[in-house]
Amino acid sequence: MEATVPELPEPSSAAASATASSAPRSLAEALRARDDASLAALLHARPDLLGPVPGDITQLATRAGTRASVVRALDRLDRFALQTAEALAVAPDPCPYPVLESLLAGEHGGGSGAREDNGARAELPRALATLRDQALVWGDDERLRLVRTARELLAPAAGRPSPTGLGPTVAEATSGMSPTRIQEIVAAAGLPATHDPVSAVAALTGLFTDPERMSALLDEAPAEAHQVLGRLVWGPPYGEVTPNPTPPVRWLRDRGLLLPASARTVVLPREVALHLRGGLAHRETEPLAPAVPADREHRPQLVDANAAGQALAALATVEELVKSWEHTGPPVLRAGGLSVRDLKRTALTLDVSEPVAAFWIELAYAAGLLASDGEADERYAPTPAFDDWVELPPAERWSALAGAWLPATRTSGLVGDQDAKGRTLSALGPDLDRSAAPEVRGRVLELLAALPEGGSADPEALLARLDWERPVRGASSLRARLARWALTEAEVLGVTGRGALAAHGRALLEHRDPAPLLAPLLPEPVDHVLLQADLTAVAPGPLRRGVGEVLAVLADVESKGGATVYRFTPGSVRRALDSGRTASDLHAFLAEHSITPVPQPLAYLIDDVARRHGHLRVGVASSYVRCDDDGMLNEILADRRSAGLGLRRLAPTVLAAQAEPGALLDGLRSMGYAPAAESPTGDVVVTRADAHRTPARSAPVPVPDGPPVPDTTLLAAAVRAIRAGDLAATAVRKEPASTPLVPGELPRTSAAETLATVQAAALTGSAVWIGYVNADGAASQRVIAPVRVEGGFVTGYDHTADEVRTYALHRITGVAELAEEHL
């Protein structure tokens, strides 16, 4: 096997003095030959190369070849670009373009290696350009080279089979074999004996790569041997054998068509497999992205209307959720998050399933509307931002929710799963962040946006497209789940309607304000209800805030939808009275906001509850019950249900109790009474709990999927710095008389020599080359033109940074003059 050419660049002095050649000799030379736009495109596609900004092209090339960076780049390739890289990993190094083309598209014509044209031949230039742009492949079409790290990751190995299904080469498979055994294989294959194992392996490789001689050899094989080869040809290439193998296996092993991989395992050499495959690296290539056609088409107006209805329901659900937690929010688990019991309770409150409830909880948290209060008895509660949010117009409130959903990395669909340690993941708990979620969510919406307006996609076709675009090894199942969740969440939130992207959803995707598009689709709030004789009220649309808040206290929600149905009960009326309202207040409210007359049963209900409300008084002693009607107190004492309250008579109109006031109130109410709480001064206590708010909290920050993508300003500055650093690194210096300069190392001069050289340069106005170590310990090479040297600092024009800078003399490792032609 041809030795791999090192990818580390030649020493900078040699690179600077070398004349332009027909092909780059290293990845660094290939990058150095790029224009600024191409370098900026590389840094944009692989932002991890910018942490920190490389000092020159050599550092950029070295960093681009590190394992972590290459793995990340490979994981972001589409399927055909990845298949191209896999083919290069099993091809000769370097690989001519025609050889790569035959590995992926088959041979031209109708030979044994011909493959039906599926677009691979036409798409190969595009895939190869992608690999070149990302610095995974370098060299011209005559000498294509995959970076060494990528070859090591994608090439076959004993513990890691190649994605192509190919095994090791003959040279690799025979590396530990005895010379005698190799000569026996050569002789059995009909080849002349050689004087050394290297030439014997080369002769065997030459036989397996010669189509005519290889075909002649296989023609002599028994029929059963062809069956054995057929089971291994497309991989995996390893098979187990017994100590006494069958004659067909022995025939193949004797001629090297199967080579031993261990005591009980044989492997099919790569050259043999490629001959049997007709020279193809993959059984199936996928050069073209699967199409995502419109599965169904709807009128765009219908899609927008459906999405707007879902958006309105989303606003009501989030508001109901947060308000249900503003008095006594659920406690925070010790490990963080929400308990299963509290999640179930919230799902019942919202009348949704638990996964949907987890989505709304996480959405409110992502929007900064919910958080933990940070108290000793830590609980979840609304944040101050919720009070600002509820005052916004509905379209703007929805924009805030959708704007938090699109980039969120917290994934509610994982709630209920188990982590690597077997612990159940809880809503609002740790370990719910998945950095790929925003990218998958955005790509799902982009594919929907590419359809005709009103068109919805088949989820399976959409998932197939996503899998082709990012066939991430080991993470494809998570991406598929993320895509399915994105479709469901977009529909529930109102980004899509009937599976198609709505107009305001398209604006959200394009980072435009969706509120102007959504606002005309939302109904105007109403300030009236329709009271009915069966003690219900129907709200024909979303209620204005003040009306809705009062009605929510006075009645219970019975059903939701376009028209919300409220039911009045003795408990709901008592709740309104407990909040400080009187019977006359309730009658006035209903008369003002009902377009139908107040039904007599409802008026009677309010008066009856109000008549009994507050007749009993509960206060704090331990607690006590006070009532002017001693007959009622006798009735309570005689009731067996009051035994647990620990009541005893203190006076004809006063009972003392062992229970706390709250428990005493609840106990008497469960017995059918309507007591009111009493303050120490004897006044009726309004029992409505104060709305609890957390301290100011910021919304959770999404976890980035690697380094952030740099903007154009940063890219331009980075390219300029790399170019300038490369200029300094490749500048030709004068060789000092004493110690010659070592290419690639910083100059080393004494403090006196450094001071004298920079002072002389300042007097003559010439430039010098310095080595400098900054306060963080980072070393760099720079070309400067000193203009002032004083106080232990040198100030001059830095050609590397293209600006005037000041450097501490004690941090300059050494200095060298530039050659005459580079002054």
Image (cartoon, rainbow, N blue to C red):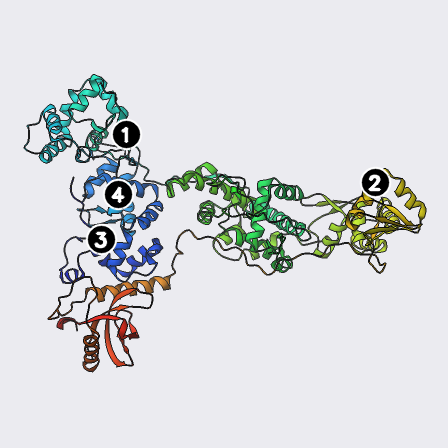
408 in relation to 157, above or below:
below
Q: x and y percent of residue 666 in the render? A: 79, 46
Going by the numbered disc 1, the residue's amino acid type is Trp
Residue 27 tag number: 3
Residue 53, visible in the rendered structure: yes
Could you tell me how far apart the alpha carbons at marks 1 and 4 are, in whole angstroms? 21 Å
* Secondary structure type for disc 3: helix
Q: Is residue 301 among the parts visible in the rendering?
A: no
Residue type for callout 4: Glu
Contact, mark 4 vs mark 3 (Cβ under 8 Å): no
Give the foreground label among 4 and 2.
2
Mark 2 or mark 1: which is in front?
Answer: 2
Measure how far apart labels 2 and 1 are at the Cα level: 81 Å
Label 4 to label 2: alpha-carbon separation: 80 Å
659 or 199: nearer the viewer: 659
Residue picked out by circle 4? 152
Residue beneath label 2, please?
643
Q: Pinpoint residue 188: horizontal percent, then vertical percent.
A: 11, 23
Q: Which disc number belongs to residue 234? A: 1
Q: Which of marks 3 and 1 is nearer the N terminus?
A: 3
Disc 3 to disc 2, C-alpha distance = 88 Å
Residue placed at 22% from the left, 67% from the top? 728
Q: Which of marks 4 and 3 is nearer the N terminus?
A: 3
Chain-order first, disc 4 or disc 2: 4
* Three-letter residue code for mark 2: Ala
- x then y, percent, for residue 713: 37, 64
Q: Which of marks 4 and 3 is in front?
A: 4
* N-terminal label among 2 and 1: 1
Q: Residue 89 is drawn in which quadrant?
A: top left
In primary-sequence order, the first of circles 3 and 2 is 3
Q: Do the residues labelled 3 and 2 touch (CB within 8 Å)?
A: no
